[in-house]
Image (cartoon, grey):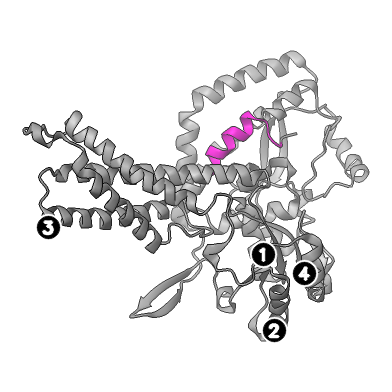
Amino acid sequence: MTANRPLSERPTIEPRWLFLLLDGMMAFLVFALAYVLRYELQVIRPILDPAQRDFMPYVPYAGVYAVLIWLNYQRNGLYRNIVGRSWLEEVYLIASSVAVSIVIVLAMFFILQPTATSRLMLIYVAALTLIIGALSRLVRRWVLAYFRHRGIGIRRVLIVGMGDIGQDMLGTMLARPDFGYRPIGFLDDDKTKAGVSVGRVAALGRTDQLEEIIRKQQVDTVVITFRWKHYDRIEALTEICRATGTDLRIVPELMQLSIRQVQVENLDGIPLLGFGAHRPFTSADQVLKRGLDLILVALSFPLWASVSFLVTIALKLEGNGPVLFRQERVGKGGQKFEMLKFRSMVADAAAMHEQMLQASGEDPRHPKFVDDPRITRLGQFLRRTSLDELPNLLNVLRGEMSLVGPRPPTPDEVEHYEARHTRRLQITPGMTGWWQVRGRSNVPFDEMCAMDIYYIDNWSLSMDIEILMLTIPRVVLRSGAY
């Protein structure tokens, strides 16, 4: 590893030259496709002069266009590995680069006055470049996500300092594995934090053990979240990272004011950082979210009603209890409600819960029993396919639950909550959520809570739609459910 490597120079799975080569080939490809559309298919407007049908005069311009695309992509940072940059941001940068490149080629047409030119063909070139470039970046994201899910291309991260900002960083890394960061542990000089792990993220000791931990845990990146009043300590930790060749990131203290509401402005070369107030989950947001719930539940009614009818018949034939299982849960603002599910356990399952909890040593805040003996044969199928949760849709219609949101806890689980955990109760609980699509039942409580808080702080309608889309393959593949 190389110390002080710029953010854009971090290693990636694909070689650096790959997209340079692909973008160069794409420039010639789109010129060829645009030629076919213009001269062979004659889309939009016919060609009246047969002498203009030769492709060879366009080849030099395709070469110039390839160079311009490279330069503009480089200028706009498309070849830099920027963590957290969205696909839509990349599409905008591609569109900006294409526009500049096409204008220059068009200017060359006017200046050089070649015998065969078509301005309409350049419009095809621009449109095809944007479409192919956007799709190629989307495929790249899918491929990287596939490899990262299997541990390839992941950077092992050690967080130094587990205060508020450290917990926020940890929650973001857990909630967004697509960023390519895997938190393997943290260091803190506070004894109450240094000895308590957060889910599967281990507490590895004090900061004076940094060098030892870097070598022992094969750390790729260290993230320091201390305040600047600990400058001497930060400087000492920085020197250790340099000496061991470890990539280092430091969270500026001003970022601790509001990590999500930073706006950067440029005043004639002088950078200005603006901090807006943190936008809460507003009433308008709640109306949008409620509207999405009702529309989707209504549109899918024929499907889920038919399946529910079949499940009801199967449960009636099995006997051994009622069709619906009713359980008290805690919803938004601590309000209790009766959650409905299809029965998947034996009649006296509730009486066995406390005994099983003590025997298994499961976390009482989020107990999950593998090979639970209380589950019936039909119940195993219902749980594996998540069909037991279909009656939750009735809770959604009543406004007690949403399609997407934190898992509704039982009152017994809430009794074990710390103050920070109660943030999960700020919004309406849901049938699926961010942590479910990232691990389903396999996620420990502290990680689950961090992901729920990330969801609450970053909510958007598109995020709900993304979670619903990710839930479908999870359910079909029966991943993490038991």
| Position of residue 265 measured from the top left corner of the image (x, y, whole percent) | 39, 74
Q: Which amino acid, by three-letter code, is at mark 4?
A: Leu
Disc 1 to disc 2, C-alpha distance: 27 Å
Closer to us: mark 2 or mark 3? 3
Q: Which amino acid, by three-letter code, is at mark 2?
A: His
Residue at mark 2: 230
| Position of residue 468 measured from the top left corner of the image (x, y, whole percent) | 54, 39
Disc 1 to disc 4, C-alpha distance: 21 Å
Q: Is residue 288 above or below residue 227?
A: above
Q: Which amino acid, by three-letter code, is at mark 3?
A: Ile
474 inside magenta stretch: yes
Answer few, some or many: residues within 10 Å of disc 2's Cα (few below 14, many 20 plus, some between 14 and 19). few
Q: Earlier in the sequence, mark 2 or mark 3?
A: 3
Residue at mark 4: 187
- Residue at the image position 83 percent from the left and 27 percent from the top: 347
Q: Earlier in the sequence, mark 3 or mark 1?
A: 1
Q: Which amino acid, by three-letter code, is at mark 1?
A: Met
Residue at mark 3: 111
Closer to us: mark 1 or mark 4? 1
Residue at mark 1: 1
Label 2 element class:
helix
Labels 1 and 4 touching (C-beta < 8 A): no
Q: Earlier in the sequence, mark 4 or mark 2?
A: 4
